[in-house]
Amino acid sequence: METAIIQGLNGITWAMVLFLLASGFTIIYGQMRIVNIAQGSYYLLGAYAAISLAAHTGNFWLAALVSSLLVGALGLVTEFVAIRPLYEAPLYQILLTFGMMLVIGEMAKIVWGTIPLTLDPPALLRGRIEYAGVMFTRYRLAVILFGCVVAVSLWLVYVKTTLGAVLRAIVDDRQMAAGLGIDIQRVGMVSFAAGAALAALGGIAAAPIIAVYPGADLEVLLYAFAVVIIGGAGSLKGAFVASLLVGVFDVVAKGVMPELSRFTIFGLMAVVLTVKPVGLFGRG
Amino acid sequence: MKRLVGIVLVAALGGLLWALPAFGPSDYVIAFAARLLALALLAGSFNLLMSFTGMVSFGHSAFFGVGSYAVALLYRRDSNPDAAWALLLAFAVAACVAAALAPSVLRTSGVYFVLLSLALGQVIWGIVDGWRSVTGGTDGVIIAAPLWTVLWPLDTAAATLRFTIVVGMLGLAMLYVIVTSPFGAGLTGVRESPIRMQALGFDVFRLRYLAFVLACGFAGVAGGLLAIINRFTSPDSMSVRLSVELPLIVILGGKGSFWGPLVAAVLLFTAEELISVLTPMWPLVLGLLFMTCVYVLRYDVMRVAANHHLFSTRGRQTEGSRADGAASL
């Protein structure tokens, strides 16, 4: 029983990392109709930058903040320089962001080497806590909490603010939103930066739990895709629900049959798509 | 007339390749020429999807890899059948895997098709990479058996190259026949306007399904050839990089052209080989190449300059169909 609970909590922790990554992807897709293959690279860069910054400053929180801001700024620049000339050319956007993934991956290999690196959790979150016979690390619990806080804040922004209304309008009908005087390019630029920063946060949150290494970008990208496919592209609610599904399912499957764990994710995707081809919360 | 010129050119090229070993290059060069031919067949099979059916799959290399594993694992057993049979098996296995997985992929369109095909390719890679007891994991599978065919034994690099020429030319010829057949015309119709095809009474899903299964089958043959040439296969044969190189190749060679992408494949993979010898950072160069190509060729998408491409002969789309195409991807 204890192991089952711990496995479940591990699954939820992983789910929160996936949510940070996939929510960024889904925001970018929802606001800009761009499939950002480089999303995994932002995850990788966020984690690597935080590791370097933490090594220099010795402060986890500062490193996490600066790293996510840096990656967000990189997203802003990328959108302006690279993505903007390619609006309405989806295939070319995919190829471009794939090229970016290769370039960033190789650069990261040059800067940070090929040995898997990890980040030390902050002093406040070291050690374990025990409740009713279940031992669980503080850090993982903090990741779960953080993921939920981000999810709730995003939800509040989307539902309660004027900015949220603008964002939802663009998801629903880009042309109409533009016609109403919304500057969809500027919103897109900010969304791209926010999406990149969210992916970086995912990488930072994951870095103390699972190591960062060359190739991790592609690996997490697959999970982000699974989440987006299951939850529905462009839907934040879908990203949250699907992250929980994929995260828990993945951890359990890895425990039961490690060799074929990837197939179970595809099985999950196939089942969902058979029932609803646009994902659980997707709309056309 | 144009077709005749094409046939003569291809025959001349095949003859030249056939005679290549006579000029006394090293086995490395001969094997490399054979690999290029196998990769050209892969590009041709992908082109059937992208140019002639309008489906841009980002997981095509998975079926290439499935074919190569089908052949390699066949020879790991104690049997040693004719290599041609092994390639037929590669076709069958890749096509069957595609036939089983296609329904869930082809039901989707647009962004879901992109994500799902890429994810599917990665999943197949993950299974092969992880299932050590059967596939040997990252170590791959070595073919130790002395290969042979009914034509000649594949005991030298030259013999393997000539076998590859026979199979590769046959495969490409079959793809050409498919593309120019009434069935191919149906596929082009699906690419141009699925809705109108449906209105004309065609079963759009069935056409797409058949094209997908056929293309994956040919990719399997190409993969099987690669395994035979290298006497080895590994999960690298189904890397996502290869999957995404394929659409780049088609764009470089000219979408809608049959021959252009084959030439582009030869050029790109030659560049890959040459640059990989010089530096381990080929992915960096490839990434920059991706970004450059996208910028140079993006005007085609915006219909400013349609003649940017090498060899673009067919598939000039009307404005309306361009809009359809943009919406479907």
Image: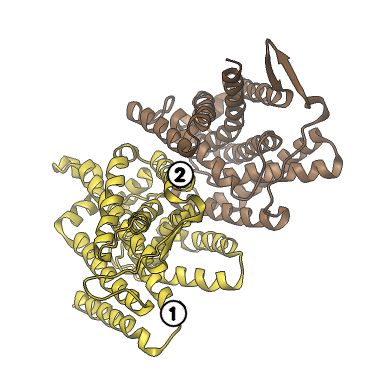
Chain colours: A brown, B yellow
Quadrant that contains the N terminus of chain B:
bottom left
Q: Disc 1 marks which residue? A: B27
Q: Marks 1/2: CA distance?
A: 33 Å
Depth check, front residue: A234 or B279: B279
Q: Residue B141 is drawn in which quadrant?
A: bottom left
**Which residue is the extreme one toward the top?**
A132
Height in image: B4 above or below B54?
below
Subunit ID for the residue under disc 2: B
Q: Secondary structure at mark 1?
A: helix
**Which residue is the extreme one toward the right?**
A57
| Residue type at tag 2 | Trp
Query: Can I make out residue B89 in this image?
Result: yes
Q: Position of residue B302 (x, y in %)?
A: 43, 56
Q: Disc 2 marks which residue? A: B131
Residue at (81%, 41%) from the top-left corner? A54
**Which residue is the extreme one toward the bottom?**
B23
Q: Is residue A242 left or right of residue A200?
A: left
The mark found on residue A121 in the picture is: none
Depth check, front residue: B230 or B244: B230
Q: Position of residue B38 (x, y in %)?
A: 36, 67
Q: Who comes first in sequence, dot 1 or dot 2?
A: 1
Height in image: A16 above or below B246?
above
